[in-house]
Image: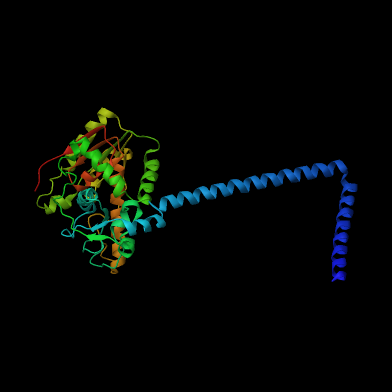
Amino acid sequence: MKNIRVRKIGAKVKKYRLRRKKFASIKKIYGRKNIYEFNRVRYFFKIIIVFILIIAIIIKIYILNKNIKNNNYGLSFKQKMSDYLTKKFAVFGRRECPYCGIFCFFIVHLGCVNKYVSEGYIPIIDMQNYDSIYNRGDRNLKNPWELFFYQPNGYTLEEVKKYAKNIDYVKCHTDFYKPSEKFIYYQNDSMKFWHDIQQKYIPIRNEIINQVENNKKKFFGGSKNILGVLIRGTDYVSRKPKYHCIPPTVEQVIVDVKEMDQKYKYDYIYFTSEDEEIRKKFIPEFKDKVKYLNPKYSLNYINNNITDIKEQLKEFHNFVRIYIINMVMISKCLDVIISRCHGAAGVFVLTEGFRNTKIYDLGIY
């Protein structure tokens, strides 16, 4: 044991002597002053490298925290687990409208959320267990509502059903007090009331909001002088669904947009319609001034060339996601020209207010 220790000490002494000898030879060649200058430069570069590494770590932590914030809404799982044990949950969904659009569900669900919150429940929206165009009868798929909106505080339908101890499965009726598709455009107090309910209990998913912000920078730069235009398509004109609003003609809208543009000198016009024929007429009138985000498919929401139902649904959900992005984009414009429909009512829930509005209220079919 002693011999091993002596050998180790001897090896260290030998290594030290070699280093001294090497340093002496370098010093002899370059001189003492140059050696000190070399060491000073070397230490300076070491400090620079350490500084760069620290900055890189800080940036990485910032990006990680930002991603966590963007991908996780609401309470921590531990906090939610405590709520699952102690709080009352009301699980509901609109049942009688399998072909309704997303903002038709949105408006009705806001009324149901308001009702059950006032009764002391935490509302949970269920679009999984009722047949609709969003699941095409496949109830094993993830709750479609949660593809586009958060539940309150980041709860999920799956977690609530699995962990919550106090669940009431209740009905969501269309006659509950909800945003008025007819009058909300003219009622600032109602707009603010429902805006606050939506922001607190059914906020739009962060990835959709992030896409909106990216589009705003891409389309408008820093400009806020934007006119938003929303026109319903020929699906209304051709089918004339009973009790639905009559949309204006595209020619009428073009005249009104030109009049407002002449008056307010907009930097850009943000335009959305699910109808390709309307887009073909509207966009050439305003050329580069008009900005828009088109879905891959227009009125045929499902691509019939795809036979796999899950792939069809994936494309349809992408279509809906773009539709919601468009509604949020319109809600952030300075002024709007808009025709009455559930999407338009949704825009007036999402907005924090407009300066000028023109609402087409041309009666119903």
For residue 306, say whether it is visible: no
The image position of residue 280, as x and y in percent, is 25, 47
**Rendered-image quadrant of the N terminus:** bottom right
Q: In the picture shown, does residue 255 fall above or below 11? A: above
Nearest the eye: 22 or 149: 149
Q: In the picture shown, does residue 57 fall above or below 93? A: above
Q: In the picture shown, does residue 31 fall above or below 143? A: above
The image position of residue 169, as x and y in percent, is 22, 61
Nearest the eye: 161 or 25: 161
**Residue 287 image-quadrant placement:** top left
The image position of residue 241, as x and y in percent, is 11, 53
**Residue 351 image-quadrant placement:** top left
For residue 194, say whether it is visible: yes
Please give the name of the residue rendered at 29% of the width and 55% of the height, measured from the top-left corner: 319
Please give the name of the residue rendered at 27% of the width and 39% of the height, measured from the top-left corner: 228
Total residue callouts: 0
- Residue sticking out furthest to the top: 263
- In this picture, residue 57 sits left or right of residue 130: right
Q: In the picture shown, does residue 211 fall above or below 165? A: above
The type of colouring in the image is: rainbow
- Residue sticking out furthest to the front: 86
The image position of residue 277, as x and y in percent, is 22, 49
Please give the name of the residue rendered at 33% of the width and 33% of the height, measured from the top-left corner: 225
Please give the name of the residue rendered at 31% of the width and 39% of the height, measured from the top-left corner: 332
